[in-house]
Image (cartoon, helix red, strand yellow):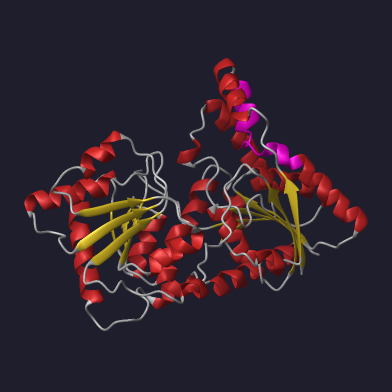
Amino acid sequence: MNFLAISFPFPPMALPRSIQVARLLSGLGSAVTLICAETDAIKLDGTIYPDAEREIEKLVRVKYTAPLLGKQFSRVLYRLSRKRWNERYRNPDQYRSWSTPVLETVTGLLEIEKPRFDCIVTFGQPFTCHMIGLELKRRLSLPWVAYFSDPWIENQFNEYDSHARELNLRSESLVLQQADMVLMNSSETIDLVFSKYPVELKDKARVLPHAFDEELFKEASSPASDRLLIRHIGEFYGPRTPYPVLRALLHARKVDSTRYEDVTFEFIGPYDLGPELDEILSDPLLPDVRFGGRISYLESLAAMGQSDGLLLIDAPSEQSVFLPSKLIDYIGSGKPICGITPPGTANSLIREIGGLTADPLDLECIERVLADFVDQVRDRKHSADKLPWGRQDVRSRFARAAVQSQFSEYLVECIKSSGR
């Protein structure tokens, strides 16, 4: 099988999608030609699969250059005309100018090397990759698989106004209609995204979850200290904050000042939370709570493996279809998980594997669940149980080899159903 893949992120870009694409495509066992971006606009992390490029049959990096004075121009245009700003930066995203050089690169490959591709695979986000796939489908008439790491229109973090939503709904509709197969990381995401389309369109959708790489967790162990170390690893931004957990800890200590005396809560990753954080951290009743900055990807995996328990904190919402790739890495670490996450995909998975959850808006429930979680983590630390935590049948679904195998099966299915 020989396929053409389009993904803006790829190592060493410090993006979750970069990690997942490398984990899926490198060492897949198929002939892969991957076109990805080369840019100074995104932070790099050399610890993310440094050998991935050598494990792809052909990798072409196509330059993406952020416009000079881009931020200043964006701010001015936003003030002058929100409509024009949407068309430039939200149609579908700020990387749309990457489409032209990518299409030119594909044309050059076909002219010079005459590869015979069996299908096209595009990875979004950014959704510019799917717009490239749409044009390649038109030009080459090849089977096309479109993978969505997150919902497009229903993603609360996109914060579309009515005009931007209209533009992107039109693009999403074209992609879902023209793609031969659509992959999403949960059945809940599929249900949500396709709920606004004719029911038969959903027949082309399949579930392909994120994966963890067990090879990267070989050194996992609990801290030698008698103290418990509970960690959250990842960035806080927008509505995703540590405040629900911090408030619950503070309230618990006001009720019982000895609670959590043997526990350190550590939040690792970028954050910009303002003066409220300083106010909470200055309260003498708060237990041992620490904040650290950005670390490399491999350091983050080591931090997971060298903790006693892990916290997942999501933004509040009535229902969440998001399946964070970080949660799958948490599962790979084999450490107990507690999710402060709304009803939905992540919540259900944490419960299925044996973890505890609480809604970010329910302070009383968070306080109770954190207390139960710490008790469970303490019991596990003091027991002789050294096996990876969680139901093994659930863990195995997200192992890299299993997800790669499922991906290959989907590609074969797509190619065969197209009659090629």
Furthest toward the bottom, the residue is 384
Which quadrant is the C terminus positioned in? bottom right
Residue occupying the point 21% across, 64% down:
374
- Please say if 308 is above or below 382: above
The percent position of residue 97, horizontal first and vertical second, equals 71, 37
Q: Is residue 91 magenta?
A: yes
- Please say if 140 is above or below 47: above
Return the residue nearer the eye: 202 or 50. Answer: 50
Quadrant housing residue 295: bottom left
Return the residue nearer the eye: 244 or 158. Answer: 244
Quadrant housing residue 64: top right
Q: Is 297 on the left-hand or right-hand side of 273? A: right
Which quadrant is the N terminus positioned in? bottom right
Residue occupying the point 60% across, 70% down:
404
Res. 410 in view:
no
Q: Is 116 on the left-hand or right-hand side of 244? A: right
Q: Is 98 on the left-hand or right-hand side of 283? A: right
| Residues rendered magenta in the picture | 83-99
